[in-house]
Amino acid sequence: MKRAGESVGAARIRLLEEIERHGSISAAAKAVGLSYKGAWDAVQALNNLSRQPLVLATAGGRAGGAASVSPAGRALIAAFGRAETALSAYAAEVQAVLDGEGVDFGDFLRSITMKTSARNAYHGTVTTVIDGAVNAEVTLKVSDSIDLVAIITRESVAAMDLKPGAAVVALIKSSFVLLASGHERLGISARNRLLGTVSAITTGAVNDEVTLAFDAGKTLIAIITHGACVEMGLEVGQPAQALIKASHIILASG
């Protein structure tokens, strides 16, 4: 069975096309050879990386539930098709030049494409950069209600040319996320406090996967122990908060 994370480009665009065609994530998953969870993870990743939701879905689980591709999603599908056609022609021209040098242009492109094991990735815009002696504090806007603060080295700020207005991607490992039930403020040093609602819980023998939903179709996945999930009484539909240390956020730019 293919996994959604194996391809960020064409595979996920095809998933969008099938959601548009069937009006259902479960039906689209079958069409592209994904499990329902794999397709749902891909949809959440696409929505998190887009400034606007690409897929609008209502609850229904494996049995169904309505889903539609937003105007932004349809525009992305059309743009990807045009870009794919143009890039294919360009790649053929480049490969014709490289054939005599023993270089495969396709292999080269695949080798420099970023892949990451981080479950949570968000597109954002830098709003402030506070310089320090060794590290810098970078704040980025992800959505109207979500701002993330990251601590990275001054060298990284310079290398990525981070300044207000710069586009970046924030990566957060699911195991780095602390969860607490409710929205009451806690006395904790974690700089990032995101208020959301539990939208899904996948139970395991040792660990549980908990998904929090925010505005603008954004979601966050946390891996916590099954015992902790039970002790907090986390249930779908319940308010909860995610706590993330600034040093646990990785920033990437193109």
Image (spheres, grey):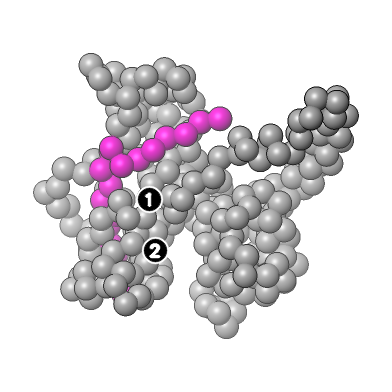
The residue depicted at 29 percent of the width and 18 percent of the height is 131
Residue at the disc numbered 2 = 211
Q: Does residue 167 appear left or right of residue 184 in this picture?
A: right
> Can residue 55 be seen at all in this image of the molecule?
yes
For discs 2 and 1, the disc positioned in front in the rendered view: 1
Q: Position of residue 13 (x, y in %)?
A: 69, 54
Q: Is residue 77 magenta?
A: no
Magenta span: 235-254
Q: With 138 as the anchor, is 161 left or right in this view?
A: right
Q: Is residue 6 above or below residue 231?
A: above
Q: Secondary structure at mark 2?
A: strand
Compared with residue 115, is residue 42 higher up or lower down, i.e. above or below?
Answer: below
| Quadrant hosting residue 101 | top right
Return the residue at label 1: 173
Q: Amino acid at mark 2?
A: Thr
Image point (36%, 76%), residue name: 203
Spatial CA distance of label 2 from label 1 is 13 Å
Q: Quadrant of the C terminus?
A: top right
Image vertical order of residue 44 relative to residue 160, above or below: below
